[in-house]
Amino acid sequence: MIEQSANEYRWLNDDEFLQKCRMSRFAFDWVLDQIEDCPVFTTVGNKKEGRPQAPVIHQLMVFLKCIGTEGSGTASKNQRNMFGIGEGTSDVYRDRVMKAIRKLKPIYYGWPDKEERKKLAKKVLKKTGFPNVVGIADGTLFPLAFEPQTEDAPDYKGRKHLYTLTVMIVCDYNRKIRFYHAGFPGSAHDMRVYRNMDLFLNPRNYFSENEFNLGDSAFSNSPYMVASFKKQHGEEMTEEHEKFNKLLSKVRMRSEHTIGILKGRFPWLRSIRMKITTEKKSLRRILRLVEATIILHNMLLTCNENMEMKAWIDEDDISAYDAEGREEDQTELMKAVPEWMPNDTRRNQLLQHFHDYVWHS
């Protein structure tokens, strides 16, 4: 029956195929080509003997059905009804494809090198006026469908949902996810998660002396992180601070779109129907599937699948300010911030930059 389902998928029109497989036909065939030679698909035990596996195309479709469905559609029972596969087989297929995609991590996931960071920073400068920006950081919540069966279950109660995982995502301006951290319970503050990332702990391994990330007011300022101004209780925000925040929000929209696309294309992240128990492997299984989903997101961007982005989220042109040609005005911004200076030094330099060369030019 699963072979019949595969043939039916081939008869779908382009829009129907896009909705069922969460990607275009071209992208599907490209992903299939990337994973089908993985040793996990040989036979049982990765040996050339034993019962042959189902074709990789069938296993990939089961995987995409799993991560492309919100709620009970991801359950094994639903998979059995749709593909006619035995009990537990859908989980086996899902895990195989997950392993194959995770093996592609060194190719499709990683922090940009020095030359690529320069290119990314130049693009952000041209589009928004912000110089030297490498990434945009933002936290998000992945809702859990079931209450964790652990002593720390109350910690999973997040700000917006009953039980959640807090996930920190750092993307570039092209919406490619460059760094992430998953596993903290929903009650964890974004800055707490960010402080536990190697990106924060060892910034010199990821940034040149003049480079930094952007974030909202939940983050603390440092030479490598510029956050928006926070309105203090009972005080009015100055006009320049409001202008700065508005400009910064134009860049931060890219991270919001990235997260929106990730959850929109792969709805399983909106309601994770995998239980967290006292066994460590239960959470580890969720985190591995999250990682595979993020790698697949990057893979689809690599093959220009972002052309189909409107199927998952409305996208607007946010190129409000063309700052090309202003590199010569960034003397202070090109220097490293000494460790003894205040944490918000980099943000104040940016504020002065916009005051001198943008708002009053």
Image (cartoon, rainbow, N blue to C red):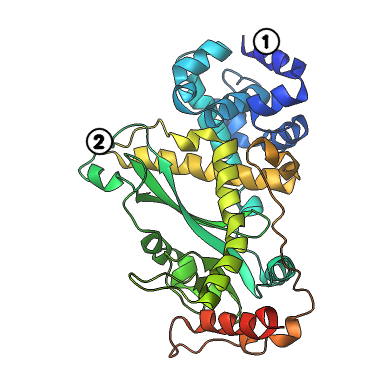
Is 223 in front, or is 321?
321
Looking at the image, residue 25 sits to the left or right of residue 20; the answer is: right
- In which quadrant of the rendered view does residue 99 lie? top right
Looking at the image, residue 15 sits to the left or right of residue 246; the answer is: right
Looking at the image, residue 305 sits to the left or right of residue 255; the answer is: right
Residue flagged by tag 2: what amino acid is it? Gln
Q: Is residue 141 positioned above or below 204 on the image?
A: above
Dot 1 or dot 2, earlier in sequence: 1
Residue 206 visible, this angle = no
Question: Which quarter of the image is occupied by the N terminus?
Answer: top right
Residue flagged by tag 1: what amino acid is it? Gln
Q: Residue at x 70, y 22 (%)?
A: 16
Residue wearing tag 2: 149
Residue 230 visible, this angle = yes
Q: Is residue 174 positioned above or below 343 on the image?
A: above
Element assignment for label 1 = helix
Q: Residue at x 72, y 65 (%)?
A: 127
Looking at the image, residue 233 sits to the left or right of residue 326; the answer is: left
Question: Which quarter of the image is occupied by the C terminus?
Answer: bottom right
Element assignment for label 2 = loop
- In which quadrant of the rendered view does residue 75 lie? top left
Residue 355 place in picture, x, y as percent: 62, 83
Residue wearing tag 1: 4
